[in-house]
Amino acid sequence: MTDLAPHELRVLVAVENAGSFSAAAQVLGMTQSAVSHSVRTSERRIGAVLFDRGRLGARPTPAGAGAVAHARRILRLLELMGAEARGAAGPAGTDTVAGPLRIAAFRSAALFLLPPALERLRARHPGIEPVVRVVRELGRGTAGEVLDGRADLGIATIGTRSPVPKELVGGVLLEEEYALVHPVGHPAPRSLPLVDWAENCTSYTRDWWAAQEWIPAATVEAEDDGAVLSMVSRGLGMAIMPQLSLEGVPDNVEITALGPERPTRSVGYVTTPEQARSLAVRALIRELRAGGAKPPSQIVGSPSNCGDRPAGLP
């Protein structure tokens, strides 16, 4: 197989992003026939059909989805190679970490976990330009964004039932416990309807959850943890929520510990082995570990592990 050139990789990424050869041609400033020729050439060199062509445009085949993910990651490494080489060639003592740093994070991590770490990061490395995308932690979640080359680093919920994908590396930043959240002063909060949301990582606490006879099936389904807190604050029910979601709870919401057997979940970072060696990603990981990943302090007690910490992570 003949290696693909960077411009051919960019064509593959543009077609996948745009959803058609004609739209990709507009983005790239090329003719549609030139885009089509480039894709056919890439398919011939790779030995697989990368896109299904149809009236509705071009959609990646399973082989194409993998090829485009590799293309994004390769193009990103080429960008990093140039940026770090230019930094190393600069005057001695200058900041050698510069350029965009793409981060994927679920909502509560983007709101409360990242900002203090990014504040310190920018103070030490003003040339870094963080680009944060909020991604629902469902399905492939933030790890999928890293695998697909859309993010350099993801803040993810990780554990024995959702391990770090074998293609990535990662580490645990904090263990956050779950707590009962209910309207202030309610005489029997456990009797209230349950308010829940799809990202409430119950897969990490499935055994504990199933063993609690007092927990009803969700009566109210909300879009995210912020909506859950709003509903609880209006007396519409109670919720069982992880610690990171409890920053800035309304005054009329009370947080009650679930006892020594309470469940926890692990929150950490994931990245590719290549990105883990890049200066910007290493700098962010240092800041996350240095104090930006401290858990909220509303709940008193030391969280237990529940066996969800992944083994073998750096």
Image (spheres, grey):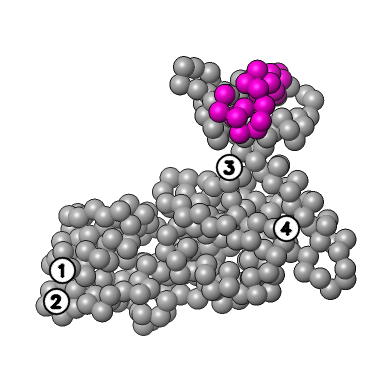
Read off the residue under disc 4: 278
Q: Quadrant of residue 201?
A: bottom left
Read off the residue under disc 1: 235
Read off the residue under disc 3: 148
How far is the residue under mark 2 from the one under mark 1?
9 Å
Q: Is residue 281 part of the magenta span, yes or no?
A: no
Q: Earlier in the sequence, mark 2 or mark 4?
A: 2
**Amino acid found under the numbered disc labelled 4:** Ser
How far is the residue under mark 1 from the one under mark 4?
48 Å
Q: Main secondary structure of the magenta part?
A: helix
How many residues crowd around disc 3 within 10 Å: few (fewer than 14), some, or many (20 or more)? some
How many residues crowd around disc 1 within 10 Å: few (fewer than 14), some, or many (20 or more)? some
How many residues crowd around disc 4 within 10 Å: few (fewer than 14), some, or many (20 or more)? some
Read off the residue under disc 2: 186
Q: Position of residue 56 (x, y in %)?
A: 45, 21
How far is the residue under mark 1 from the one under mark 3?
41 Å
Magenta span of residues: 22-44
Residue 276 in view here: no
Q: Locate the N terminus and report the quarter of the image it occupies.
A: top right
**Amino acid found under the numbered disc labelled 3:** Asp
Q: Position of residue 222 (x, y in %)?
A: 26, 55
Q: Earlier in the sequence, mark 2 or mark 3?
A: 3
Residue 184 in view here: yes
Q: Quadrant of residue 111?
A: bottom left
Q: Earlier in the sequence, mark 3 or mark 4?
A: 3
Q: Is residue 30 part of the magenta span, yes or no?
A: yes
